[in-house]
Amino acid sequence: MRAVARTTVAALALVIGATGAGAQDTATLADIRAQLGTLYGDVQGLRAELSSSGALSTGVAGATPLDRLNAIEAELTRLTGKTEELEFRINRITTDGTNRIGDLEFRLCEIEEGCDIGALGDTPSLGGADSAANVPTPAPATPDAPQLAVGESQDFQRAQEALASGDFRGAADLLATFGTTYPASSLRQQAALMRGRALDGLNDTPNAARAYLEAFSGNPEGADAPEALFRLGRALGGVGQVQDACVTLSEVGVRFPQSPFVAEAANARVTLGCT
């Protein structure tokens, strides 16, 4: 019976671990579902073992091994249903967001002179996931700033200085080169946002919109995502895509309700006459 009790306690501990798995930094929904499936098989094995030994219904009524196994199975069923629900919601959001970004890229290409629509290719899944059915959890935030490549900091600083001085052409060129030279840079979102602002300064609104779209879609939860989404919406209005602009601007408040850009997005919606 002690062995049975230890096994039951271990199973309960696994259930608790599965319940909190959504909060783990490295676990994914697929991992959690696999763990739940394994645990369910272990519980069934335990039930068969107890049944063959005749210990399944021994003990105090309401606290027998059978009662405990039934409670564990009920919890496993609930957790499995919850993970499937979350997976469905994440897949839907990822698919809808990716389709919308692809549509915006297509529309911007139509507006931009010399853009080859056939060369656009497939839009990468929102958040960088290759498959909507396998969406990883966000990487944990680290307190220490990531190390920059040699020359990366200096190149970024030169672009910042050019933008601050009003040299929009120089800033746009420097930031375009920065994005090509350091494609995996931790400053990539900020650089794309700055390039959009530089292009705005050159009155190149279509390309500015594309830069803002790149800044947002590359990291939809990043620190600069609210500003990128706001500026994208305003730029879409500037190229005549009013309906898309209104929808995009409304998303600022939905996604980032605490951001100071919510008020600016609301003002932009009023200016565009959004309903």
Image (spheres, rainbow, N blue to C red):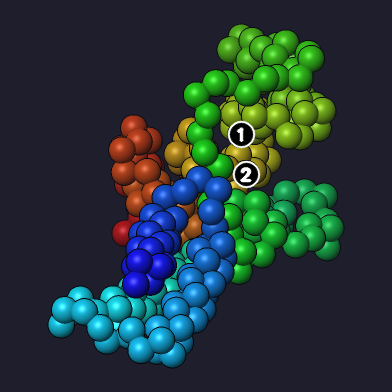
Please name the residue shown 37% across and 43% down the image: 256
In the image, residue 74 above or below residue 19:
below
**What amino acid is labelled 2 in the image?**
Gly
Q: Vertical placement of 77 versus 29: above or below?
A: below
Residue ID for mark 2: 218
In the displayed structure, does residue 30 sit left or right of residue 184? left
**For residue 209, which quarter of the picture?**
top right
Q: Residue placed at 59% from the left, 29% from the top?
A: 190
Give yes or no for contact between labels 2 and 1 (Cβ–Cβ under 8 Å): yes
Seen at 21% across and 79% down, the residue is 59
Decide: few, some or many residues near mark 1? Use Cα within 10 Å; few <14, some 14-19, many ≥20.
many
Residue 149 versus residue 159: which sits nearer the camera?
149
Q: Is residue 92 above or below residue 26?
A: below
Please state the horizontal and vertical placement of residue 77, each as a whole percent of the image. Answer: 38, 78
Residue 149 placement, left or right of 230: right
Tell me the kind of residue under disc 1: Gln
The residues bearing labels 2 and 1 have C-alpha atoms spaced at a distance of 7 Å
Q: Secondary structure at mark 1?
A: helix
Residue 261 lies, in percent from the top left, at: 37, 35
User: Could you say which quadrant of the image residue 107 lies in?
Assistant: bottom right
> Looking at the image, can residue 199 be seen?
no
Which label was assigned to residue 189? 1
Q: Residue at x 16, y 79 (%)?
A: 60
Percent x, y of residue 17: 41, 57
* Image mark for residue 235: none
Provide residue 205's location: percent of width, then percent of height.
Answer: 62, 39
Question: In the picture, which quadrant includes the N terminus?
Answer: bottom left
